Image (tube, rainbow, N blue to C red):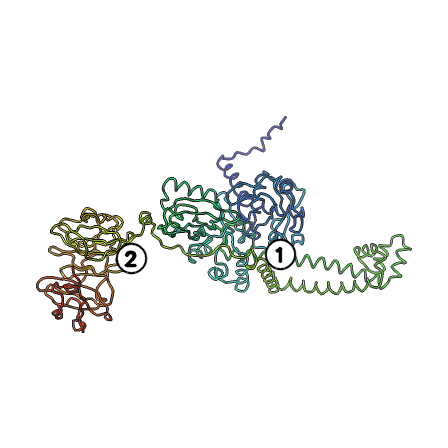
Amino acid sequence: MSKPLDPDDIRPTRLTEALGERYLAYALSTITSRALPDVRDGMKPVQRRILYAMRELKMNPTQGFKKCARVVGDVIGKYHPHGEQAVYEALVRLAQDFAYRYPLVEGQGNFGNIDGDNAAAMRYTESRLSDAAMALLDGIDEDTVDFRPTYSGEDQEPVVLPAAFPNLLANGASGIAVGMATSIPPHNVAEICAASLHLIKAPNAKVETLLQHLPGPDFPTGGIIVDGPETIAEAYRTGRGGLRLRARWEKEEGTRGSYVIVVTEIPYQVQKSKLIEKIAELIESKKLPLLEDVRDESTDDVRLILEPKSRNVDADLLMEALFRQTDLETRVSYNMNVIDANGVPRLMDLKEILRAFLDHQQVVLVRRSKFRLGKIEHRLMVLEGYLIVYLNLDEVIRIIREEDEPKPALIKRFKLNDEQAEAILNMRLRSLRKLEEMELRTEHKQLSAEAKSLRGLIKDEGAQWMRVSEDLKALKERFGPKTALGKRHTQFGTAPVVAVDVEEALVQREPITVLCSAKGWIRALKGHVEPGGDIKYKEGDRARFWIHAETTDKLLLLATSGRFFTLACDKLPGGRGHGEPVRLMVDMGDAEDIVSLQIHVPGRKLLVASTAGNGFIVAEDEVAAQTRKGKQVLNVGAGEEAKVCAPVEGELVAVIGENRKLIIFPLSDVVEMTRGRGVRLQRYKDGGLSDAKVFSRKDGLTWIDGSGRTQSVEKPMEWLGERGQAGRLAPKGFAKTNTFSPK
């Protein structure tokens, strides 16, 4: 029968306040006891308890393996009162070399794989501690850290590990608490040690300086970081941020120009089986038209085969499409929330994390030195008692033989303490030989020297940091780049700027000859055909543009309205018949005519001009249009038309008017724009602009006459003037059409 409630113990409390207090307690417990790691050893309580339990079971790297079930049982029974499956999953993760950069547990049996398969049951698997774990636990019995009672009060457990190994940054951490989360990627131990050594030398060093030694994460599964140093520095400076991590791939050539892409490393924490499943789904739903097939040829190493739809598909273009739609590229987040040395959860930057690790190492060193000094002082005290025996051997023997209580008698006779007297009484007779006395004196001398050294170390902070530096250098050598585990796995790179145009990527590159007549009928002949031959046009029509191109090229068309249009060469009608009118392909008016038709060259610049003599320079990338309506670039007034579209290849501009007057001036006098009327190139009383071109002083001014021959003027600089002038009459023999090339 339950005890009745005492009315005096009942306190009226608002429900919201009661819920708030209890939820806050739960939240704090989750943050400090489950989700966030300690900045000093980088461990959550369950991980710390697993390693400590394994050490108590003597599961050292030099010993044999023991069943994981035994470890889990000890952890649950003594230290961690939670579910056995949760503890086993934490143990398994500590042993996975694809999850931990430096595994803390060495496993034997099935501990899962990168495909996402689960580990075998704990009764089948075996484990023992790794070298990195032994570094974390080194010195734990030497009063280096505080202990607290376990949940049952029957045993003691460490509050934190001595952590001579920088586990927080080396293996990273992730966890979600109530209102807080942490996400710290793994790093390379040699680089962590290098940054820590620099921080010891320069305590005021900035994060950017530390990043010269610790450039970024180093994931166990490799991959390539494609974000720049600025992005990485921002994350380490603020404690928050992210970076892009890509799979590593290479192109493997096949027969007859075919190839496949081989993925050898996938991003961190991406399950290979789910990745393949996702790619297969995208292929099935036709969302990856560039990819034909995916298959897994992995053994111990990752080897994913990606087969393109065609050998003409550009490999970089295909991979960019995959990076955008699959986990072949992932974003790794930084959220460096940790529990500090005072038990307070807070956000830290890289420098604060390294400083907390170093400060912990200094504390451990001092406590370890004091512990060792205490042991030495106790031993010296005992040795001094032994030496008294050798100096007064006969008297000691007499007291022991004759006295009923020899211990008080020894203490009184030789002024000993209780421990010295007890040690003398426990001596063996064989220890009374002369050689033993010499050994004791030698030991006393050595221990006295060590005690003096330890006292100096405890008092001298500079000597302490020197010892910490020596330990870091030894750790750097132990896990350095010369070892299989220590060499950097993840590299740094840049993501190529590739415009993913699927339709263009599927076009097979073949040579063609584009023909466009004076009336705007266009067609494409296979191969590069030279002008002439049996090429027929419609009655009353004639040849105008004859262009050698490829099916993957784009054509830029400038109409008299000043509007640019873009034509895809693979979409042009075939060479049979007379082709089709350009007006059916783009929205060009019946009153408009074609001014120029040329292959689009990315990065090139063009000089555009109207019949009124106005013009400007425009980047060719700015005029490329993606729609049928085209792109208005050159504005023309009433009675004006676009007249010139010439490539910019030189430093001088030549303009010829309908009045046969020529003017030459520097290209730098012409403004560069994306749209407008431009500036005055040449002035006229009657007529307008006939043609213009850009040329270099070195090549000189040339033109093509009516017979197709190239002509030139000996001294073109005689026509040099200022932009906007009328100019002088063209040289003798200049083309009667008043153009530099036939139109």
Q: Position of residue 740 (x, y in %)?
A: 17, 64
In this view of the protein, which residue sits in the foreground, 128 or 697?
A: 697
Residue beneath disc 2? 602
Asked which quadrant contains residue 605, the reply is bottom left
Q: Mark 2 falls on what kind of element?
A: loop
Residue 531 visible within the image? yes
In this view of the protein, which residue sits in the foreground, 251 or 685?
A: 251
In this view of the protein, which residue sits in the foreground, 406 or 266?
A: 266
Badge 2, how many Cα within 10 Å: few under 14, some, many 20+?
few
Q: Position of residue 232 (x, y in %)?
A: 44, 56
Residue in the image at 62% along x and 27% along y: 2
Lower sequence index among marks 1 and 2: 1
Q: Position of residue 461 (x, y in %)?
A: 60, 63
Residue 196 is labelled as none
Q: Amino acid at mark 2?
A: Pro
Of badges 1 and 2, nearer the viewer stands: 2
Residue 241 visible within the image? no
Residue in the image at 15% along x and 66% along y: 724
Left or right, 631 with respect to 40, comes to left
How far apart marks 1 and 2 lie (CA) works out to 63 Å
The quarter of the rendered structure image containing the C terminus is: bottom left
Direction right: furthest residue: 402
Direction left: furthest residue: 686
Left or right, 542 with respect to 272, comes to left
Q: Amino acid at mark 1?
A: Val
Residue beneath disc 1? 364
Q: Position of residue 470 (x, y in %)?
A: 60, 62
Q: Mark 1 falls on what kind of element?
A: helix
Badge 1, how many Cα within 10 Å: few under 14, some, many 20+?
many
The quarter of the rendered structure image containing the N terminus is: top right
Q: Are marks 1 and 2 in contact (CB under 8 Å)?
A: no
